[in-house]
Image (spheres, rainbow, N blue to C red):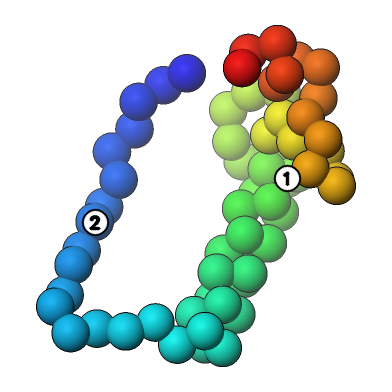
Amino acid sequence: MTQVAVRWAHSEGTRINPLIDGARMFQEMVRIRWCDLDGKYEGDGAIGARPGGALSEEAASEV
């Protein structure tokens, strides 16, 4: 595993809109998955999880 920096911004008084923010999160997850399948990330092109939530044998052995 590698430690990576995370950008964090907190603004007092902001709220989450489940409809808009949920759609944005879904879009970001699709973009991440697409980039993974397209080979834009280092590694073997598999993020370790299988559809349905089951971990691959390799990912399970790392846990």
Number of other residues with Cα within 10 Å of mark 2, as a class: few under 14, some 14 to 19, many 20 or more = few
- Disc 1 marks which amino acid? Asp
Q: Is residue 2 above or below residue 21?
A: above
Q: Left or right of 13: which side holds 56?
A: right
Q: Between tags 1 and 2, which lies in front?
A: 2
Pick the front one: 22 or 47: 22
Q: Which element carries disc 1, helix, strand or loop?
A: loop
| Res 58 → quadrant | top right
Pick the front one: 6 or 55: 55
Q: Left or right of 15: which side holds 21?
A: right
Please name the residue shown 20% across and 63% down the image. Answer: 9
Please name the residue shown 56% across and 88% down the image. Answer: 19
**Residue bearing mark 2:** 8
From the top left corner, tell me how far across and down residue 62 is, in percent: 63, 13
Checking the image for residue 38, the label placed there is: 1
Q: Is residue 46 visible to us here?
A: no
Q: Tell me the quadrant of the picture where the C terminus can be found.
A: top right
- Disc 2 marks which amino acid? Trp
Q: Which element carries disc 2, helix, strand or loop?
A: loop
Please name the residue shown 56% across and 77% down the image. Answer: 22
From the top left corner, tell me how far across and down residue 60 is, in percent: 72, 19
